Image: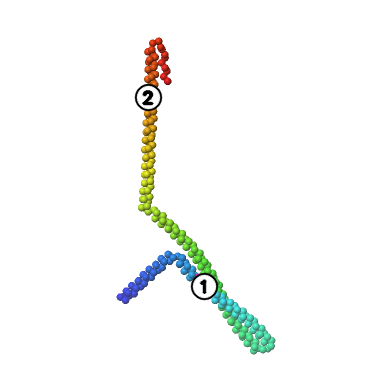
Amino acid sequence: MSMNRPEGFFARLRSLVSGLFQRWVREREQESPEVVYEQAIAERVRQYRELKSAVAGILYLRAKLEAEINDRRAEIARLHDDARRAVRRNQDDISLTLIAQKQQLFEELERAEQELDAVRAEAEDSKANLVRYREEIRSLVREKGRMLATLANAKARRRLQVAIEGLSTDAELDALEGVREYVTRLTMEGDIDKELGDTGLRNRLREFRDEARMQSAQSELEQLKKEVESHTLTETSPGAYSPAPTPA
């Protein structure tokens, strides 16, 4: 039991270190997405080249088998003609030998055709995989462009949001509100001075007008007194009579 504890401890330690390393790798990958895409594309390109080389080998084998089959068919045709000539010449031993060779070539031809069918099927599958790998690489390149553009846009939006949030701190808002209040108070003080100045002017104008009215009333009073005195003197003068003037 004591022997298992160190092993369990080291296993847990290896698991912890492995987990931390994987986390560190993921963080580095997230910080460098372009590098991750480049590595993925490079790996696909490497696999594509290996598959392309394998497909080339299969196509070469297919062409070789096709050429061998054509040669065997031509050789079978020649052996058949030779066997017929030997039969016409009554050379049965030669005819038997030629027929045996032809039958052997038929067997080899059958095996070669079976092998050619298998190679052709493998070649078609390999070419389809090659096309799929090529399209995958192109798709990955397009995805890289889109994702990097999206990432750049997201980072720009994030920087803008951070800048806006940085400008909207409570301290700066308080300072801005204080400036607004100060400007408003100064404006109000200017309006008060203006109002005070206008009131003094209006008061002086009112005094001037009141004085003018008083002077006009005093003049009218003096005029009335003179008219009254003149009328009184006229009435008291002997042998003179004049009607009282009609008030204006």
- Of the 4 image quadrants, the one containing the N terminus is bottom left
162 left or right of 145 in image: left
- Residue 63 rendering spot, x and y as whole percentages: 58, 77
Residue type at mark 2: give it.
Answer: Gln
- Of the 4 image quadrants, the one containing the C terminus is top left
Disc 2 target residue = 218
Density class for disc 2 (Cα within 10 Å; few <14, some 14-19, many ≥20) is: few
Q: Please name the residue shown 44% across and 65% down the image.
A: 32
Q: Nearer the viewer, residue 123 or 246?
A: 246
Q: Nearer the viewer, residue 173 or 112?
A: 173
Disc 1 target residue = 49
The reply to whether residue 118 is visible in this rendering is no
77 left or right of 34 in image: right
Secondary structure under the numbered disc 2 in the rendered image: helix
Give the magenta part as a residue range: 45-53
Secondary structure under the numbered disc 1 in the rendered image: helix
- Residue 175 rendering spot, x and y as whole percentages: 36, 50
Q: Nearer the viewer, residue 34 or 125?
A: 34
120 left or right of 181 in image: right
Q: Please name the residue shown 38% across and 12% down the image.
A: 237
